[in-house]
Image: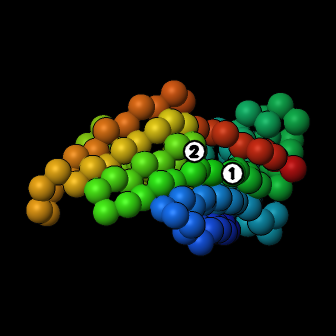
């Protein structure tokens, strides 16, 4: 069992520029945990604790916390440019969150309006951040 949520801050736009920061977190309440000897049966990606930490230290930890989004954005009538840690949905990538922590990517994306009702998107990502935990297992 897990409890989680997100807090996302979007700034106001000034001359087309803005920024976004998003915190994501999940907790594993102590009143609904499996026994230590059953941890090996937990499905990977379906739990809110580190199976390794439980097997080695017996600690379930306090949860997972991550800075999921942190990017600058420039937007006008033709372009939308984002640089930093961001969600990105395409046929090749997806944020499909695991443990209530989304997959994010560090890089630059550009969406350009090329015709009426047609937008082209390109991206360069230097890193995938599915497990970029700021404070994992408090």
Q: Where is residue 22 in the image (x, y as percent from the top left)?
A: 64, 60
Q: For mark 1, what is the residue?
A: 67
In the rendered view, tell whether residue 122 sits above or below residue 21: above
Q: Position of residue 25 (x, y in %)?
A: 69, 59
Instruction: Give the residue displayed 32% in from the left and 49% down from the top.
Output: 111
* Quarter assignment of residue 106: top right
| Residue at 73% from the left image edge and 33% from the top image edge | 52
Marks 1/2 in contact by CB < 8 Å: the verdict is yes
Q: In which quarter of the image is residue 84?
A: top right
Q: What residue would you read off at disc 2? A: 85
Q: Which of marks 1 and 2 is in front?
A: 2
Specify the farthest residue to the bottom.
12
| Of 31 and 4, the residue lying toward us | 4
Residue farthest toward the left in the current orientation of the protein: 116
Q: Is residue 32 above or below residue 53?
A: below
Viewer-side residue, 41 vs 57:
57
Q: Earlier in the sequence, mark 1 or mark 2?
A: 1
Q: Which of 43 and 89 is in front in this view?
A: 89
Q: Residue 110 appears in which quarter of the rendering?
A: top left
Can residue 43 be seen?
Answer: no
Residue sitting at x 34%, y 53%:
79
In the displayed structure image, the side of residue 123 where residue 35 appears, left or right:
right
Q: Say which quadrant the N terminus sits in.
A: bottom right
What residue lies at 37% left-to-right and 37% top-to-bottom? Answer: 123
Disc 1 secondary structure class:
strand
Q: Which residue lies furthest to the top in this view?
A: 126
Residue 75 in percent (x, y) is at 42, 58
């Amino acid at each position: 069992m897990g409890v989680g949520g997100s807090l996302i801050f979007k700034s106001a736009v000034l001359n087309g520029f803005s920024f976004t920061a998003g915190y994501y977190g999940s907790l594993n309440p102590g009143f609904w945990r499996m026994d230590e000897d059953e941890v090996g049966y937990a499905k990977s990606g379906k739990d809110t604790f580190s199976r390794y930490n439980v097997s080695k230290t017996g600690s379930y930890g306090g949860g997972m916390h991550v800075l999921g989004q942190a990017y600058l954005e420039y937007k006008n009538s033709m372009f939308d440019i984002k640089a930093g840690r961001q969600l990105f949905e395409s046929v090749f990538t997806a944020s499909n969150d695991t443990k209530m922590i989304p997959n994010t990517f560090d890089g630059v994306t550009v969406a350009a309006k090329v015709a009426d009702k047609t937008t082209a998107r390109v991206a360069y990502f230097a890193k995938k951040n599915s497990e970029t935990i700021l404070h994992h297992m408090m």
